[in-house]
Amino acid sequence: METLAESHRETNTSAAAPAQTASQADARHVLHPWADLSGLGEQTSLIISQAKGVRVRDSAGKTYLDAIGGMWCMTLGYGREELAEAMADQARRMAYYTPFGDLSSEPAARLAERLSQLAPGDLNRVHFTTCGSTAVESAIRIAHYHFAAQGKPAKRHVLSRINAYHGGTYLTQSLSGKDADRTLFQYEADFVHHLSSPGHDPDRSNVSAAEKLQTLLEEMETEILRIGADNIACFIAEPILASGGVLTPPEGYQKATFEMCRKHDILYISDEVVTGFGRLGHFFASEARFGIQPDMIITAKGLTSGYQPLGAVMISDRITDALAKAAPKDKPVFSNGFTYSGHPVACAVALANIEIMEQEDICGHVRDVGPYFIERLRELRDNPIVYTVRGDHLMACVECWTGQDAGPNAANMALAQKVDAYCQDAGLLVRPYENLCIMSPPLIIDRTDIDRIVATLSDALAKAQADLA
Ligand code: PLP
């Protein structure tokens, strides 16, 4: 008689039979994040199977220079033995234990201590999560808890910005302000408000930075007065908007918005998932670059150099002390967190990551090569299909246009896709988004590879331009 296992095998074999290569299995069975649904089942994905330094190799053996750095996260580059060893060592010693309540692990405790040393001001408390989105969600919940505990539960509205990106969960997508992502899903609109996109591109703007700043601040104050400061818990902001198109606010914006938040007793949450951990040449850009000490800072991605998923909310003593004092006596539990919050293997690799970053002065390296990267990319503005090039240190983008109307219209988006395809043919990965080619290379990139990125992009732009003619 057939055993249960045999009958199972038969059923499973027939169900799985059509998949032959990883690429086919992927096309048949995976629903990718941010996938183009019109190509579902037909589109084949590029399967990346090996990687070293700033280069990755696909399953067919073709090598690419990875100018995306995975997804803004692969900061120390691929194949770092020390990071692999830190993970293996921790996995052998103790792969997992719960962080709930009064249980902890040594890597999580040590990492929290290190992060407090690196973070500005009194941000001495760390609430670990599993990724950037869960860290942002947690920060908003902390802001709500903070005011509710003070007897101000009406202070729950959140200010965000158009073009912001804060994650892929229900609330973080609601906070995000990227029009292209707003489709048939539902979004929280009751307590989330979007201010104008703060990006200011001096090359392509007909207003000065000072005028733009004033307009943004006036709008923010008007919105605060309209909603009522007594109803607003927090303002969340990426210091430079990353996925929304590498948008840099006018000089002084971060400080002025921070001061406005202070004036109205609104908590300031700085989302440094991209700008932190070296991408702008500092562990945290909020204070080092923009002169502010937020109430909370979100970090993820480069925290582990992308080797493990991990997120964290850095919280000021001012907030945590208030939470502890105000927690209801009969219900003192801080009910937020995840099974894998501060996973020991992820924390172990984050600790090793910080050690390498300090030993190799990665932030100093970024401060050295970052301006060169931007300067070289800006040479591409000579090509007529380049509308603008913008960026800061190792986050940048090239915006394409046909020369007619600027912006993410169909013609400009098709052009950027062509540029992306030509780059890929030539062994360079950039990230196509609307009519942009976005770049965030590993922080270890050197001038020679920066020159290669620029040369390949330049050829790709020339080919896409020739196709237009
Ligand atoms: N915040 C910012 C600024 C991000 O760029 C991202 C992801 O790209 C997130 C939050 C969400 O992080 P994760 O994808 O790790 O959930």
Image (cartoon, rainbow, N blue to C red):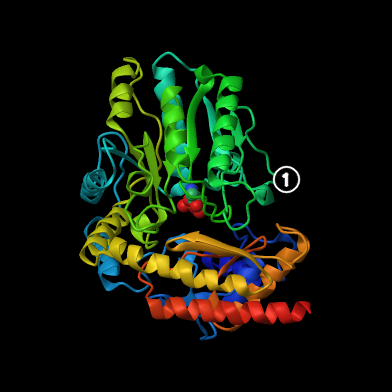
User: Which quadrant of the view contains residue 36?
Assistant: bottom right
| Left or right relative to 58: residue 259 | left
Image location (x, y in percent) of residue 12: 60, 67
200 vs 87, nearest the viewer: 200
Quadrant assignment, res 191: top right
- Residue 86 lies, with reference to residue 133, above or below; the image says below
Residue 371 visible = yes
In the image, farthest residue toward the bottom: 61
Left or right: residue 266 versus residue 121 is right
The residue labelled by disc 1 is 184
Helix, strand or loop under label 1 = loop
Total number of numbered discs in the rendering = 1
Q: Is mark 1 within 8 Å of ligand 1?
A: no
The amino acid marked with disc number 1 is Leu
Nearest the camera: 157 or 311?
A: 157
71, above or below 181, in the image: below
Task: For label 1, count other residues whose C-alpha is less than 10 Å away and answer few (under 14), some (14-19) or many (20+).
Answer: few
In the rendered image, residue 269, in percent from the top left (x then y), is placed at 43, 37
The residue positioned 44% from the left and 76% from the top of the image is: 450
Q: Position of residue 154 (x, y in %)?
A: 52, 17
Vertical side of 83 occupied by 280: above or below: above
Rendering quarter of residue 268: top left
Q: Quadrant of the N terminus?
A: bottom right
Name the side, left or right, on which 196 lies relative to 57: right
